[in-house]
Amino acid sequence: MTYEFEGKTEKDAIEKAMQELGLERDSFDIEILEAQRGGLFKKGYVKICLHTDDHQAEETLRDKRSVKRVWQETVQEEIPADEEFESKMIEFLNFVLSRIDPGTRVHVEKRERRKVVFSIDTKDSAIIIGKKGKNLDALQLLANLHAAKLRKGEPKVVLDCENYRIHHEESLARLAYSVADKVRSTKQSILLEPMNPYDRRLVHSVIGESDDIETNSEGEGLYKQIRVSCRIQR
């Protein structure tokens, strides 16, 4: 497998490749396709071709592209800050989180038309996030209940800590592809563990790319299960 990457220097291009594909430096070879020295009035530029037999690289890249596509489908235009609302939310979250870690601080990561993302800075991220993100989800639910008291309707509050959300979504994409492949080979449906609405939407979207595999939600309440099965040909 070959991939092309660009950077200001050869080192910069290699680091981008390692991060994007999840590879160690000794697992691939590179070929410099194009190079331009930097000067007083122009920037340096290097284009490399990466060669690897590591099939995990293709899966990693596929996962990230799937997550990025789902984000692009849901992203909203960034909006101006509602300083009063954000200030009160930060005050509330700092108060709650100080009971867990006194050094915790919260800041606005980004704003969109229907949601505001708050990022949590803490030394005890494992405790804040919790097993499978359950503590972070619980804190997010609490934050949205408080947000509803401050302002009815939108925006929705999203909490993140050390980019847990993107890592979690990449993991879900890998799970979705793996389960789809298993269903495809065994012809037997698989019922996944209960998920919240956002996680279910991502799994539905990733597997929805397949022509021969389909997904359906089962159960009641907020946390439902997804059944992955072979699509019935009509």
Image (spheres, rainbow, N blue to C red):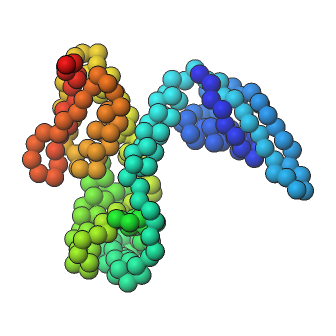
Image vertical order of residue 42 relative to residue 1, above or below: below
Residue 17 place in picture, x, y as percent? 62, 37
Image quarter (top left, top right, bottom left or bottom right) of the C terminus? top left
Image quarter (top left, top right, bottom left or bottom right) of the N terminus? top right
Residue at x-position 39% and y-position 48%: 73
Can residue 56 be seen in the rendering of this structure?
A: yes
Please tell me how many numbered marks the rendered image carries: 0
Find the residue positioned furthest to the left: 220
Can residue 124 be seen in the rendering of this structure?
A: no
Residue 219: which quarter of the image?
A: top left
Residue 32 place in picture, x, y as percent? 77, 31
Find the residue positioned furthest to the right: 40
Horizontal arrangement in the rendering, residue 37 relative to residue 181 (left or right): right
Find the residue positioned furthest to the front: 234
Horizontal arrangement in the rendering, residue 204 relative to residue 104 (left or right): left
Residue 22 place in picture, x, y as percent? 54, 36
Image vertical order of residue 131 relative to residue 228, above or below: below
Residue at x-position 88% and y-position 56%: 41
Residue 9: which quarter of the image?
A: top right
| Residue closest to the eye, 98 or 145 | 145
Residue 177 place in picture, x, y as percent? 35, 30
Residue at x-position 39% and y-position 45%: 70
Horizontal arrangement in the rendering, residue 45 relative to residue 230 (left or right): right
Residue at x-position 32% and y-position 39%: 205
| Residue closest to the eye, 57 or 4 | 4
